[in-house]
Amino acid sequence: MKSKFIIGALVALMGVFYAIAQQSDINDPLSQQPMTKVERQLMKMADISEVQQAYDTLKTDYERRNFIHALPLYFSTKNIIEVPAWVNDAILAGLASQDAFYVAEAIKTAGALKINCGPKLMDLYRTVPTKYGSNEELIKSYVIHSLSRINDPGNHQFFYEVLTTDRLPLLSAQFDALLDAIDKSRKGNAKSIVFDNKLAEYSAKVSSFKTNLNASKNPGERENRKRAGEMLKKIERLRNAIAQDQARLMQGGIK
């Protein structure tokens, strides 16, 4: 009975975050979604200085959160490459907020604009459990994804720390984001072999989890079984890629 309760709880938790992850790419602020009111307002502004003036008039964190959410689309549409100092400051202010949704938007925009705040994001990740309660897994998945876009030099070690020390829900958006981030950071990195032992452990856990789901024969768990199978394949593809990297290393292909 205890094992069935644990499986049920894990499945329920996984379902919440997998559903979130499937929303037209939550990690991509430029996904094909109707523009928000703030995005439409920004599109009418001639240049970034006008955008700054608008930001300076904001009074609440709710307004700042929606404004930050709109910035990536504006930057992309206007082909703005260099991020002004005031935008960096706005993102850092968002990361320091106690409002989980404000923090989430700041994290996503930091990744979208490739703002150099890797250490801040890593520190934030470590404090999430004590600050953001029920939003922990969501915020952690955003941090991991944004770090992979920023390409901070500390990413490789940080992802290893997360993989080996954090309690990762097996089929969550957080774990999925971490696998993608490891895959991105391992390319050309001779030290990526360190991930393999822990990935092997997770492969066994997901395989066992999938076996238990199959044994339950509950029609309502069909999507969970499918997701478990996909996650298992993803882990094994990553392990194979790391093994191939090491083979090339032995042949002198990776410096």
Image: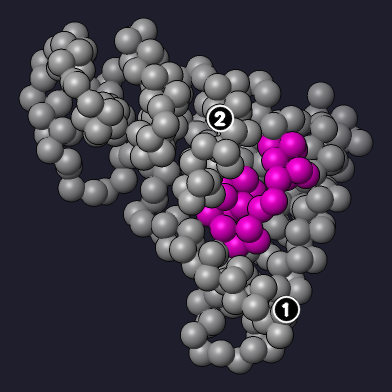
Q: Quadrant of residue 172?
A: bottom right
Seen in the image, is 131 located left or right of residue 210? left
Q: Which residue is mark 2?
A: 124
Look at the image and tell me whether residue 80 can be seen.
Answer: yes
Q: Is residue 34 left or right of residue 251?
A: left
Q: Residue 122's image quarter?
A: top right
- The residue depicted at 53 percent of the width and 70 percent of the height is 12
Q: Which disc, if any, is residue 191?
A: none
Mark 2 surroundings within 10 Å by alpha-carbon count, few (fewer than 14), some (14 through 19), many (20 or more)? some
Q: Quadrant of the C terminus?
A: top right
Residue 29 vs residue 92: left or right?
A: left
* Residue 186 visible in rendering: no
Amino acid carrying mark 2 in the image: Leu
Query: Is residue 220 found inside the magenta-colored segment of the image?
Result: no
* Marks 1 and 2, the one that precedes in the sequence: 1
Q: Label for residue 3? A: 1
Q: SS for tag 1?
A: helix
Residue visible at 54% across and 49% down in the picture: 137
Question: Is residue 190 found left or right of 111 in the rendered image?
Answer: right
Vertical comparison of 244 with 248: above or below: below
Residue 171 is a magenta residue = yes
- The magenta segment: 159-180
Colouring used for the render: one colour
Residue 60, quarter of picture: top left
> Number of marks in the image?
2
User: In percent of the image, x 29 and y 18: which residue is there?
Assistant: 80
